[in-house]
């Protein structure tokens, strides 16, 4: 590199020469600092929506996580009452998660019901410690609540540290066989029996899916909301308090397989909604097939779009990157654990893992639903309350 020096003139006084020399030294120092800055590695950037752009070194992350988690207790928060589908899957996964987390902490499941899981989501997002000891089994229908600006939603789904999802679900609506209701198509006919559906609060699949079928298709459906969880709705259906329920197949076949045995069976499945017909239910029509217009199909799809990432696990924003990485790997290894898979098979629980990056991509897709479809869906759901 060529350096250009200031020139001294004959007759310059001593003070001027000294000042010029000092500025030359300062200039050289600044050039040196700039050169060093250009060569110094910068810390990794943080990705959009609070997701780390670069995963920490696996060995270093595992060592740091093992030191932190050893002797600790990890809480898995479930926003619904005990006995329902979220609780069943959380406890199933939780029984096997500890051995895959570095340091092997104790894992406990805590129920925090309220507002279809939104109470728990708000707590985990904003109030829970950001230390990696609080995980939520996130109620994925709450993403629809965020999309529709539902009252009480105080989180942004893009900013959770997603670990992965545990199921892909197929939504069903079913009625007591003695109700005389045998199909969704029947509910579109004048004079059909009324499908009285027990639901949790608006914002859940148990409420929003049948409410959308009613509003989009003008089906003869009445929703009765306010039940704490699906276990409570099932009891109401058993007692005849309601004659129907809309829940995922993956949950109901685990909690009530007896409903579909006997002659006649206790319950009749009216319709399903998911990525095609479920292998267990090849003869049950998809709700979209009953729709007559493209708008009706769009509304039904929008009301069920979260089914692809059912029962995901998430950490709040702000958890140290090495702990996020360690827990993501722990969940992935848990979901491949032969002991977990055997446990799931024995309880008739379907598991289907999606890693964190796929979950985040679907979260963003849901929250980017066209405004016209979101506005119409909001109108339908608000009119059902």
Image: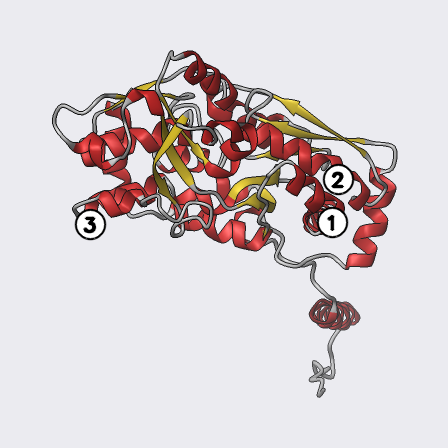
Q: Earlier in the sequence, mark 1 or mark 3?
A: 3
Question: Residue at the location (52% across, 50% down)?
Answer: 360
221 shown above or below 141: above
Q: Report, in whole angstroms, how far the alpha carbon at label 1 lies from the one at label 3.
A: 42 Å
Residue 76: % across, % down:
67, 31
Question: Residue at the location (22% across, 37% down)?
Answer: 185
Residue 122: % across, % down:
53, 27
Q: Residue furthest front?
A: 263
Q: Report, in whole angstroms, how far the alpha carbon at label 2 lies from the one at label 1.
A: 8 Å
Image quadrant assignment for residue 19: bottom right
Q: Nearer the viewer, residue 111 or 229?
A: 229
Would residue 287 be found to the left or right of residue 357 on screen?
Answer: left
Q: Nearer the viewer, residue 204 or 189?
A: 189
Residue 101: % across, % down:
79, 44
Would residue 144 be found to the left or right of residue 289 on screen?
Answer: right
- Tag 2 near tag 1, CB within 8 Å: yes
Q: Which residue is mark 2?
A: 96
SS of the residue at dot 2?
Answer: helix
Mark 2 is surrounded, within 10 Å at the Cα level, by few (under 14), some (14 to 19) or many (20 or more) other residues, namely many
Q: Nearer the viewer, residue 75 or 222?
A: 222
> On the rendered image, what quadrant is the C terminus found in?
top left
Q: Nearer the viewer, residue 185 or 247?
A: 185
Q: Report, in whole angstroms, how far the alpha carbon at label 2 lies from the one at label 3.
A: 44 Å
Mark 1 is surrounded, within 10 Å at the Cα level, by few (under 14), some (14 to 19) or many (20 or more) other residues, namely some
Residue 367: % across, % down:
40, 44
Q: Which residue is mark 3?
A: 294
Q: Which residue is mark 1?
A: 337
């Amino acid at each position: 590199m060529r350096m250009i020096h200031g020139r001294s003139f004959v007759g310059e006084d001593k003070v001027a020469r000294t000042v010029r020399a000092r500025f030359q030294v300062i200039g050289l120092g600044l050039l040196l600092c700039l050169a060093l800055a250009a060569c110094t590695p910068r810390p990794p950037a943080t990705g959009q929506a609070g997701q780390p752009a670069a995963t920490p070194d696996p060995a270093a992350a595992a060592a740091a996580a093992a030191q932190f988690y050893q002797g600790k207790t990890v809480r898995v928060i479930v926003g619904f009452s005990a006995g329902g589908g979220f609780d069943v899957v959380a406890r199933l996964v939780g029984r096997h998660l500890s051995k895959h987390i570095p340091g092997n902490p104790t894992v406990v499941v805590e129920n925090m019901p309220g507002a279809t899981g939104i109470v728990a989501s708000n707590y985990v997002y904003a109030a829970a410690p950001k230390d990696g000891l609080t995980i939520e089994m996130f109620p994925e229908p709450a993403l629809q609540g965020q999309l529709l600006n539902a009252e009480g939603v105080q989180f942004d789904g893009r900013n959770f540290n997603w670990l992965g999802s545990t199921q892909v679900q197929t939504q069903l609506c079913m009625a007591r066989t003695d109700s005389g209701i045998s199909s969704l198509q029947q509910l579109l006919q004048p004079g059909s029996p009324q499908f009285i559906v027990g639901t949790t609060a608006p914002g859940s699949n148990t409420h929003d899916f049948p409410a959308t079928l009613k509003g989009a298709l003008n089906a003869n459906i009445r929703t009765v909301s306010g039940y704490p969880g699906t276990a409570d709705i099932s009891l109401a259906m058993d007692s005849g308090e309601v004659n129907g329920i809309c829940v995922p197949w993956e949950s109901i076949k685990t909690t009530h397989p007896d409903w579909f045995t006997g002659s006649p069976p206790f319950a009749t499945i009216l319709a399903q909604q998911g990525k095609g017909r479920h292998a267990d239910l090849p003869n049950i029509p998809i709700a979209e097939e009953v729709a007559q217009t493209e708008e009706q199909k769009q509304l039904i799809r929008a009301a069920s779009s979260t089914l692809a990432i059912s029962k995901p696990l998430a950490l709040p924003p702000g958890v140290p990157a090495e702990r996020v990485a360690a827990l993501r790997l722990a969940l992935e290894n848990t979901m491949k654990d032969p002991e977990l898979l055997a446990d799931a098979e024995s309880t008739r629980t379907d598991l289907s893992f999606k890693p964190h990056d796929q979950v985040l991509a679907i979260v963003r897709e849901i929250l980017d639903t066209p405004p016209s479809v979101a506005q119409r869906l909001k109108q339908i759901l608000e009119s059902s309350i």
